[in-house]
Amino acid sequence: MTDSISDYIAEAAAKELPSSEEEDDIEDEDTCSAQELATQFRTQYTKDEASLSLKRDYVLGLCADPGFTRLAAGLSNTAVKIYDLSATGALTEVHEERVPALPGSDNTVTICGVRFLEENSNTLLVGTTNGLVRLFDLRATGEQARFEYKVNPEAEPALPPVPECITCFDRNANSRIICCGTEQHMGNVYLLFYDVRERKQLGVYYESHEDDVTAVRFHASNPDLLCTGGTDGLINVFDIKQSDEDEALCNTINTESSVHRLNWHQNVYDQDIISCITHTNDFKSYECMEGDEVISFERSDIVAGIRRKNAGNFNLINAHNLEDDGVFLLAGTNFNRGEVLRSVTAPAKDTLKPLANFVGNKQIVRESLYDAKRDLLITGGESGIISIWSPDAGSMISSNKLKSKSIAAKKHKKTPY
């Protein structure tokens, strides 16, 4: 599969399709020599790659089943590609037509999340920004159910108008509940809830956020614990088993920024920690119930941590749990089509330690997954490529038959989420 990537890059570039990769590079360079980089960072190599689109459809969503045997990649054109993942980390089979693009969708409708249900690797939820979460059984053709909020005009008290779009969604740890976040609409912002098994809507929260909801994350093992974040800078923690929104709201944390991404972690005392990546590429983490800040790194700190000079083209992509309960930050730049992709650990406050240098990256990365047991990182981004990264350089795989083509192009340069 890897052999076809260079040809793919050249062909996509020749089509002159718009992408932030085509913007002028901001001058940048490493702060140390190549020898020092090799000493400070362990090298990660591309174990396998697949190009999902020749038309520069962004990868906007990635998820894996609990055993990391199957991978779903959601594209900006609303299609989803499904890959089987071998024990060695190779992409072994592609299921292209199980989740096709939404018919009649245009560039204003994109993927806003993909999630496998916990029961098996055959049941997939796909969210799109036109307000739909669709349920697919990958052993069958077509969607099995769809969740779309309908306001009950007879509800007491009557709800203000609910927007027709959603920005993000997640399912809880027992795969029973879906929560979706919305943009601000007529002065209100909503969290919408559905029952997966009963195929019905449950209710809404609309008093806890003041601006667009940008992140919705359920706790990995507690099905009732939910955190949400928005451009209002707030992180709200809910116990959704409570009867109403006021009782469900356990804690509100003000990041004094704009929330882009949230993740759950645990510290050495088994306390729940919420990490936050802001829209200004800062990193913060908080103790879940008390709201105390655990660590905080500004954009410039992380740029220095990955040994680069210029913060102007820097992207903080994600925060992942290591097998020893540590956390690493994945960061990259827009420089030279995103070729710089590195990670650092945050073992203590005010400390960043170099971890890995992902050599040969071919795109600006926007999404990532990490399998701690096998030390496999999976990335996707603006060139529509999935890359599997491993410390093992001796098992590069070529599987051209898994290269797939999409049917719609991304038409604008701005970040599509």
Image (cartoon, grey):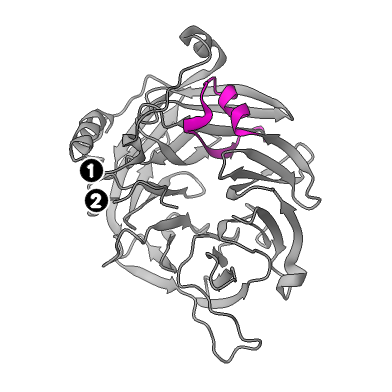
Residue under the point 60% across and 62% down: 211
Relative height, residue 166 to residue 417 (above, below): below
Res 292 visible: yes
Report the residue marked by disc 2. 406
Q: Which residue in the rendered view is the most extreme toward the bottom?
A: 154
How far is the residue under mark 1 from the one under mark 2? 7 Å
Report the residue marked by disc 1. 54
Q: Is mark 1 on a helix, strand or loop?
A: loop
The amino acid beneath tag 2 is: Ser
Q: Is mark 2 on a helix, strand or loop?
A: loop
Q: Is residue 417 left or right of residue 360?
A: right
Residue 214 location, quadrant: bottom right
Residue 328: x, y in percent? 60, 32
Residue 307 lies in the magenta-colored region: yes
Residue 235: x, y in percent? 68, 54
Count up the numbered dots: 2
